[in-house]
Amino acid sequence: MADVAESERRILVAVDEGEESMHALSWCLKNVVSQNSKDTLILLYAKPPRDVYTALDGTGRSEDPSGYLFSSDILAAMEKYGADVAACVLEKAKKMCKDLQQDAKVEARVENGDPRDVICQMAEQLSADVLVMGSHGYGLIKRAFLGSVSNHCAQNVKCPVLIVKKPKTNAGSK
């Protein structure tokens, strides 16, 4: 076990706007990253692809002059908003790293694309030793319709995957 603590590990942590990913990061900092280790924590935010808007109106006809288009100003504002969200998430994650593991070496990355694909590709490209991610805890039906990023990654990533579930709290208890 001492060999593991002394080696330089690359720990990839997928973060997003949800509480689940921040809980996973916190758990990782407390339980996976050891004090004075040579570990590198790589925070990854996968920015979902922007919807493509075409010159079609709401009915799908391009010849109708009452159709709508998003102007370049609106598209630029949407892009800026996406970048601001990514920066905010990564800033929160970096602050947590500093608060819980002051000596941890932290890198942050923002990549564009479907989170399932981005996380798998980056785990491979960055030669991650372990992938840490949160779980939304969807039930069977929701998972069937929405899919599960963590399940997809667990099935497709070559490195070990640590999925951290946030403990459920009882709404009735205080």
Image (cartoon, helix red, strand yellow):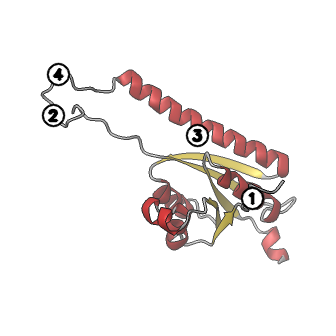
Q: Amino acid at mark 1?
A: Thr
How far across and how far down the image is residue 138, in percent? 56, 62
Tell me which residue sits at (66%, 54%) in the image.
21
Q: Circle 2 — which element?
A: loop
Q: Residues within 10 Å of mark 4 (few under 14, many from 20)?
A: few
Q: Is residue 92 left or right of residue 58?
A: right
Q: Is residue 101 left or right of residue 169?
A: right
**Can see residue 39?**
no
Q: Which mark is residue 137?
A: none
**Can see residue 148?**
yes
- Judging depth in this view, the residue of 125 and 160 nearest the camera is 160
Q: Residues within 10 Å of mark 3 (few under 14, many from 20)?
A: many
* Residue position marked by numbered label 3 in the rendering: 86
* Residue position marked by numbered label 4 in the rendering: 65
Q: CA distance from mark 4 to mark 3?
A: 37 Å
Q: Circle 3 — which element?
A: helix
Q: CA distance from mark 1 to mark 2?
A: 50 Å
Q: Amino acid at mark 2?
A: Arg
